Amino acid sequence: MRGAHRIRILGAAAAMPLITLMLAPHTVAQPAPMPLLTDTPQYCVELSDEVEEVRQSLVSPAPPEVEQLAEEGRRLCAMGEIRGGIVRLRRAMVLLHEISGQS
Amino acid sequence: MRRNERLGATQASEKSENIEGEGMRILVVEDDKDVAGFVVKGLRESGHVVEHADNGRDGLFLAASEPFDAIILDRMLPGGIDGLRILETLRSQRNTVPVLFLSALGQVDDRVLGLKAGGDDYLTKPFAFAELLARVEALTRRGKGEGPATKLIVGDLEMDLLSRSVRRSGQKIDLQPREFLLLEYLMRHAGQVVTRTMLLEGVWDYHFDPQTNVIDVHVSRLRQKVDKPFPTALIHTVRNAGYMLRSDAP
Amino acid sequence: MEGHAAELGPTGPPPRTEVSPPSARGPVHPRFLHSAALRFAAIYALVFGISALALALFLWWETAGVLDRETDQTITADVQSLIERWNQGGVPALILTIDNRLAENVDDNAIYLLVDPALERIAGNLASWPDSIPLDRTWSELPIERAGIRSLARVRRYTFPDGLHLLVGRDVQVRAELRNLLTTALLWALLVVVILGLAGAIIVRGLFRRALANVSTTAAAISAGDLSQRVRITGRGDEFDRLSETINEMLERISRLMDGVRQVSNAIAHDLRTPITRARTRLEDAALHAKSEADLQAAIERAIADLDGIVAVFQALLRIAEIEAGARRSAFAAFDVAPLLADLVDLYSAVAEERGISFLLESPEQLPFFGDRELIQQAIANLVDNALKFSPPGGMVRLSAENTGRTIVISVADRGPGIPADDRSRAMERFFRGEAARNTPGAGLGLALVQAIAQLHAGGLSLTDNIPGLKAVLRLPVTVEAVHRPPAAAASA
């Protein structure tokens, strides 16, 4: 069936542009990525100090989660898991702000 | 159509029996030489004045420019104008001359078309001359425009159309409804030849050729009532043509 | 049925040396677009493809699209609230808010940058204004690095009236990856769709061609002269089957008509030759042997009678042919059969009386019908005429009619010799004359004509034994028109 054979070829040819489209994102040149300042060990230390500051300024003592989270955060940062640590410190910060009525 | 026809001398003598002996002006529009010659000759011998055209154009010209008592028109004509067109043209000019169509086309639709276009009668070929003659003469009688009558009188025969009664020489004749219609038709065509086909169509609305001689039997029964009890006969047989109602008034 | 079948024959070799199945008409053609089957299949593939594409686009819009829209809304709301802060407390409040938000960003996805008109950083978690973001563009996508790993952010720029520039954004790497995944999947799916569509198209084309191949083969065989061929019915009762059935019916009709024509030609040749020969013989005889003008006259008159008889036969034949071809259906009108019967009885009663046959009529007052009045008149007259012709003196002919609601049944019964059972089926053939009729005048067309008239009105004629005698029954279906239209007044000649 010559006719059918020719149809198949045409179909494959039509599919070429589609495939090109799919691969496009990976071939075009991209600008150099910019680092985030909040992904650094320095920020971890900054955040940790701030958490301490707020905790000590509280009227009533903070619940134990806060200290737990802050500890975990510091430890993770020290181990090199910067982002994980920062997230925990942030969570501690959120809790503290809730308690103190500030946000 | 099943009756033979005798040409020549006999015809002339038959014609002399016709009361309406005055010749009529008849136009024959027919392209077939043989048929035309036959018809024209026959009509002339019957005492009529005949004009002939062998194509549509001439026929229309003659019909429109000269007065005729009847026109015999063939449906199929050369010259671009056929019989139907000629008739339509004449009628649209308010020309009411009676027209009889001749045609080799026998289908009822053609007949209906012809009559609708304003034709008065229709004969298919081949036809017997006697039939043609009888019908043309009946046409001209019709064409003379008799107003509606309440009584028909032929000789001593009287027919009262309102009371549906018939008297001859003052004596009442008892007729069945169909016999009355048959007699009425004969009386309306008194003095003219009435063929069997005309009676079948006119009285029984029957358009075919019956295998049996039905008409003859009906006429014979009518004669028993109308002619037999009386000294003179009114209903005559016209040999090879049909019948005629006529009083032999001196 | 491949479009314009190239009539490849003795004019030259075909452009392709391809063996096509003998049932297909012609080989593959240079332009496949001329094939109806392929066009059909292409339409199928196109519709399939477009539907799939539409579905894919819709899915994409509803998933990846929704995600993108949500992100943008969040960013815009963020920008809005920062502007509020600036309105309330100026730059210091703004800086404080930015720092706070960063400190509370538990989702770890926020990006802020506040710069002065000289593009020096004031606050936020970007080191400097990105080169790739011009100061007039609102929305951008910014490649960022998170702890060494490349990521992507969606950012929005806002410039304060005092010249400070603000960038607010979110990390959309996960969403970008999801979007890519979705896009890739859908594109591959589209490719699969294209392939499936083409495969389906090929199948459709095959089905189409197969369905039509049978018809075209049969048609070819028939035009070659073999009228016995019929199109095969698959039994599925679908449109193709119905088409095939219609074609077969048409072929059946053509076959019958051609048989009829053959029959008539045979009959004409056979049965008309006799009266024609007789007329000719008489004339020739008269020409040779007539002794007087009277003899000649008589011979001529007899010849005219013979010719009239032949003309009558021809006219009857013509009428039958007309009727069978359905040419007279246009003359149909509504009329009442009852007065027609009464008139016929009236006409023939004279003859019946003369022969001592009692002629009876049984009929309802009205019989509305829709058909050709003249033909019905002729049909019934024929039957009555026959009945009277073959009835012995003292016999009886009964003409009865009834309306069963859906059919008008008219029967003419006589007590004559009748027609023997085996002859009855053939009695309605043209020119058939039974033994009993051998010596009576007529060409044998009467019953054929009646049957043709009955069939024209979608009815039928049947002959049965009246024990003794013949009973001819005419069945005529009453159509809707007859019931709803009042019959026209009986036409006068």
Image (cartoon, coloured by chain):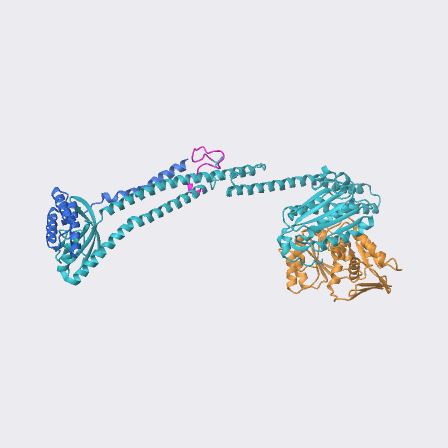
Q: Relative to the observer, which residue lies in front, B70 or C487? A: C487
Is residue B207 located in the magenta-colored stretch of the structure? no
Q: Position of residue B182 (x, y in %)?
A: 78, 58
Residue at 72% x, 49% y is C380
**Residue placed farthest to the front in the image?**
A60
Q: Is residue C328 left or right of residue A43?
A: right
The boundaries of the magenta stretch are: C12-35
> What color does chain A have in the rendering?
blue
Residue B186 sits in quarter: bottom right
Q: Is residue C214 above or below residue B171?
A: above
Percent across and percent down for residue B100 are: 71, 57
Q: Which of the chains is cyan? A: C
Q: Vertical placement of B162 versus C270: above or below?
A: below
In the image shown, does C480 or B58 lie closer to the viewer? C480
Q: Is C21 contained in the magenta span?
A: yes
> Residue at the location (72% across, 47% down)?
C411
Q: Chain B takes which shade in the image?
A: orange
Nearer to us in this view, A67 or C428 = A67
Q: Residue A48, image x and y in percent?
A: 11, 49
Q: Position of residue B103 (x, y in %)?
A: 69, 53
Tally of numbered discs: 0
Residue B65 position by quadrant: bottom right
Q: Is residue B45 above or below residue C393?
A: below
Furthest residue in direction right, as rendered = B231
Q: Residue at x 65, y 62 (%)?
A: B90
